[in-house]
């Protein structure tokens, strides 16, 4: 993994274990690994740089920037001459802090494995999205409400913090309204973001230079990096949060299945002045996806509520001693502006076309989106000659793929004859030697043919 990924790896896995243990669903609580399992892997990590090739058991591996989050990499893997490019989650958008994903240059890729998160859907242009996002947030604040932005702790949270801090700096009328981010993981990761400025894009490097120059000119000893926000503060604990008046709150987890974002949703949902702004990708079956349908009520799982004279946690006594779920009326507004760090359908198709691999495997997508993207890619085959058509696969989880690959391999054969018959004359021996060399050459061509 890359150096910046290794720097946040420990916190990411610890958070994953913690979230798995506190999940609202018994199905989601199944533990794939413990924290002890995770810690045992740390000494085995080799930190590597982008564009450097490493050989492991005859397998060559080269990482390239993937966008998405700080340190994210797509990997070019070469096995016995076969080149496979695995994108993982990737983004080609020019945002405020990340280097966008790049196509490996001068490499003929045989198999491309890529995400299909957004299928063929396309994002609204970034500047329009930012303007609409800020209009939504300020609209909530202008009516005296609180704006809740459920976010993933790493990646989009930092991008949104940059957008908000910049907007507040340009609009003094909002500077008295506090902006919080409530995520222990995001707070820890901020140290890594402050450390790896050199791994970010030119925009962050420019801000860093400007603020360092300003600090030096003023003689200030305070930190003045791009991640030292002027109008945003970290909220360590909800118990210390004075929930009075308007505010903007970025809280994890992004899917609102549990945690701080879910607790604040349950607190603020009954007030029509408040608003929820969804900024990331929402998985089917999660509260983040459900709330976008603007239901009349939501299930309470986090908020302590007094029911029947006793303190209950999202449950009320039902018949025969059973526990009935407590629901909360939803009067808050709900809007969505996609700032998910994944390529949209147009960007993905352009990337696939540029890589030009004869085999494309789609992963990381809901079945509907994956099927639509597959159909779109196959329809583009109609414009190609028969021998240049792309094979497209969209395997289900745990499904094995067998892909025939045509590759030319050359085997060099050297034949040496050490003994000669004494009865042969010198010309006869030379003729026999020539025939032997010819036989070796013919053998080489037969081997090439058999490897196709």
Image (cartoon, rainbow, N blue to C red):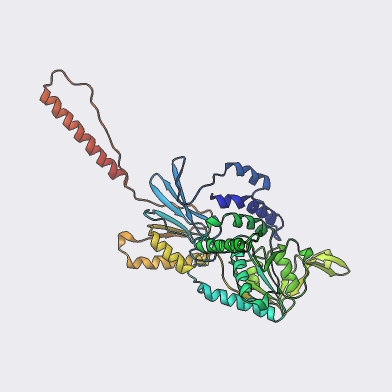
Q: Where's residue 122, x and y in %?
A: 49, 71
Q: For this view, does 360 lie left or right of residue 148? A: left
Q: Where's residue 160, x and y in %?
A: 60, 67
| 218 versus 170 height, above or below | above
Q: Nearer the viewer, residue 243 or 287?
A: 243
Quadrant of the rendered structure where residue 290 is?
Answer: bottom right
Q: Nearer the viewer, residue 309 or 266?
A: 266
Q: For this view, does 416 lie left or right of residue 277? A: left
Q: Where's residue 438, x and y in %?
A: 19, 35
Q: Residue furthest bottom?
A: 143
| 89 versus 6 height, above or below | below
Q: For this view, does 296 lie left or right of residue 452? A: right
Tell me if residue 320 can be seen: no
Q: Nearer the viewer, residue 206 or 332?
A: 206
| 114 versus 130 height, above or below | above
Quadrant of the rendered structure where residue 421 is?
Answer: top left
Q: Residue at x 73, y 69 (%)?
A: 264
Q: Nearer the viewer, residue 15 or 298?
A: 15
Q: Where's residue 127, x and y in %?
A: 52, 74
């Amino acid at each position: 993994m890359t150096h910046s990924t290794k720097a946040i790896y420990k916190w990411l896995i610890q958070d994953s274990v913690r979230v798995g243990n506190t999940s609202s669903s018994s199905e989601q609580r199944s533990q794939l690994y413990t924290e002890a399992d995770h810690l045992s892997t740390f000494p085995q990590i080799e930190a590597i740089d982008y564009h450097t090739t490493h050989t492991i058991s005859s397998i060559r591996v080269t990482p390239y920037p993937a966008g998405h989050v700080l340190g994210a990499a797509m990997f070019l893997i070469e096995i016995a001459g076969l080149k496979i490019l695995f994108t993982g989650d990737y983004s080609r958008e020019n945002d405020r802090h990340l280097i966008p994903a790049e196509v490996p240059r001068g490499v003929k890729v045989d198999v491309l494995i890529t995400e299909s998160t957004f299928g063929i859907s396309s994002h609204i242009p970034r500047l329009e999205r930012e303007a609409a996002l800020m209009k939504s947030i300020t609209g909530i604040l202008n009516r005296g409400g609180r704006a809740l932005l459920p976010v993933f702790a790493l990646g989009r949270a930092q991008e949104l913090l940059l957008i908000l801090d910049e907007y507040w700096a340009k609009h003094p009328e909002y500077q008295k309204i506090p902006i919080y981010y409530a995520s222990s993981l995001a707070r820890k990761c901020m140290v890594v973001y402050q450390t790896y400025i050199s791994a970010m894009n030119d925009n962050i490097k420019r801000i860093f230079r400007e603020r360092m120059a300003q600090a030096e000119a003023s003689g200030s000893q305070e930190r003045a990096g791009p991640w030292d926000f002027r109008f945003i503060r970290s909220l360590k604990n909800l118990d210390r949060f004075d929930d009075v008046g308007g505010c903007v709150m970025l809280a994890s987890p992004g899917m609102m299945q549990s945690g701080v974002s879910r607790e604040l949703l349950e607190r603020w949902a009954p007030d029509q002045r408040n608003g929820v702004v969804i900024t990331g990708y929402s998985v089917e079956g999660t509260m983040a996806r459900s709330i976008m349908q603007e239901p009349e009520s939501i299930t309470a799982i986090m908020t302590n509520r007094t029911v029947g004279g006793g303190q209950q946690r999202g449950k009320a006594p039902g018949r025969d001693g059973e526990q009935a779920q407590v629901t909360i009326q939803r009067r808050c507004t709900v809007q969505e502006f996609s700032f998910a760090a994944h390529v949209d359908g147009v960007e993905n198709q352009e990337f696939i076309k540029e890589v030009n691999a004869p085999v494309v495997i789609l992963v990381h997508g809901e079945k509907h989106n994956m099927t639509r993207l597959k159909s779109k890619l196959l329809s583009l085959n109609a414009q190609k000659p028969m021998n240049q058509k792309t094979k497209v696969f969209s395997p289900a989880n745990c499904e094995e793929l067998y892909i025939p690959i045509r590759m030319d391999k050359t085997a060099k054969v050297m034949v040496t004859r050490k003994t000669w018959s004494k009865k042969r004359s010198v010309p006869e021996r030379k003729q026999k030697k020539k025939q032997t060399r010819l036989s070796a050459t013919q053998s080489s061509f037969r081997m090439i043919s058999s490897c196709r």
